[in-house]
Amino acid sequence: KKVIVIGAGILGASTAYHLAKYGADVMVIDRKDKGQATAAAAGIVCPWVSQRRNKAWYHLVKCGAKYYPELIEKLKEDGETETGYRRVGAISLNRDTEKLEKMAERAIKRREEAPEIGEVKILPPEETQKLFPPIAAGYGSVYVSGGARVDGRALCNALMKGAIKNGATLIKDDAVSLITNNKKILGVKIQEQELTADLVIVTGGAWSKQLLDSLGICFKVTPQKAQIVHLEINDADTGKWPVIMPPNNQYILSFEAGRIVVGATHEDEAGFDHRVTAGGVHAILEKALEIAPGLAESTFVETRVGFRPFTPGFLPIIGALPEYSGLFLANGLGASGLTSGPFLGLQLANLALDMDLEIDLDQYPVAGAIAE
Ligand code: FAD
């Protein structure tokens, strides 16, 4: 089957990788937009302590977190080992012991269905500080050993390289359009060249609206701008530090070689404005230094900007484009797409090749993201 994938963030890269592994003839077209969510993402893979109750959403992130070790293994077999993925554990902070107990209870309950959560334990402030030295005094935590972090850029790159090794081709292009005839998608046009395919898959994140506009379809995806700061500290073995989830809806992640990532903003009204703003950086640093004053002497390295793609109800969509044939899409990965993206890409590949799915498509209807 010949498949064209438009958009190579984590979702498109995973879709292409799995399709190529299945032996499909895959071409990927990506524009590398400024603000690609995957390239800016923090990289927390720890969905089990979230308070969000939406079952359809939880199924995706739970399956996503579970799928990671298997995917990392597959990539290794393809010679791709640079993914930045590591199960370093995650700690959720609070000064209130009762809240910590509730959080631990929730994680232990969820472990019945998700043994990959691993060990769950409440740590007193001294123990918490041992795991993450820059932290302020007085924070206890819930430690979850299955929590992991991943480098979105590195993983996306590894997936694309893996896809190419399995026969896929990648084209960087910024002027792709769809070729249609009688509500059937026949392929794409890039420059003056027409490329036909059995199937086109749109995984363009926050930018997918423009592409579907050309069909007269109003696709309801909105970008939520996020700014995120990268710091660096010396002389510490940061590669093994756990993911820190403070009570203030911010987070702190540590990578190899002293890299510390703090963030992020949630800006609903900024559109595709990809500037780093004084207010954004100020808000991030103020919150981060309040939680971890030990980071005050770190080096300021950079601020990244990304656009989280949100579809209505903050719930991803996946499936065929209604009333058309030849086009599948998935979108709306929102704030948890590094967690769900690799798994959802696998589902999309399975869908494209008429294979079994581990999700119920009725829970993620594409029609729900299309304006009447
Ligand atoms: P994107 O990564 O945005 O990729 C879309 C791609 O499609 C882009 O490369 C774009 O150029 C291309 N494209 C679009 N239209 C076209 C076209 N017409 N032609 C060619 N190419 C096109 N998730 C977690 O699980 N954990 C986290 O800790 C986390 N932290 C985050 C922190 C920040 C700051 C941000 C911004 C996001 C975070 N996320 C996190 C969410 C996650 O990054 C996103 O949900 C996910 O990356 C979305 O992936 P995507 O492939 O759908 O979109």
Image (cartoon, rainbow, N blue to C red):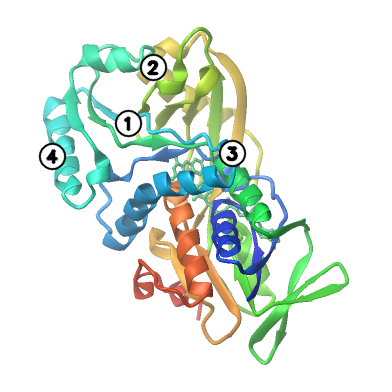
Vertical arrangement, residue 331 with respect to residue 308, above or below: below
267 or 150: which is nearer to us? 150
Residue 104 rendering spot, x and y as whole percentages: 16, 35
In the rendered view, tell whether residue 258 sits above or below residue 71. Answer: above
Tell me which label, 4 or 2, sits earlier in the chain.
4
Element at badge 3?
Answer: helix
Residue 363 image point, x, y percent: 34, 71
Which numbered disc covers residue 80?
Answer: none
Q: Which residue is mark 4?
A: 105
Q: Which mark is residue 154?
A: 3
Q: Amino acid at mark 1?
A: Ala
Residue at the extreme right: 192
Residue at the spot of label 1:
90
Counting residues from the N terminus, which is met first, the one under dot 1 or under dot 3?
A: 1
Alpha carbon separation for disc pair 3 and 2: 27 Å
- CA separation in Å, label 4 and label 2: 26 Å
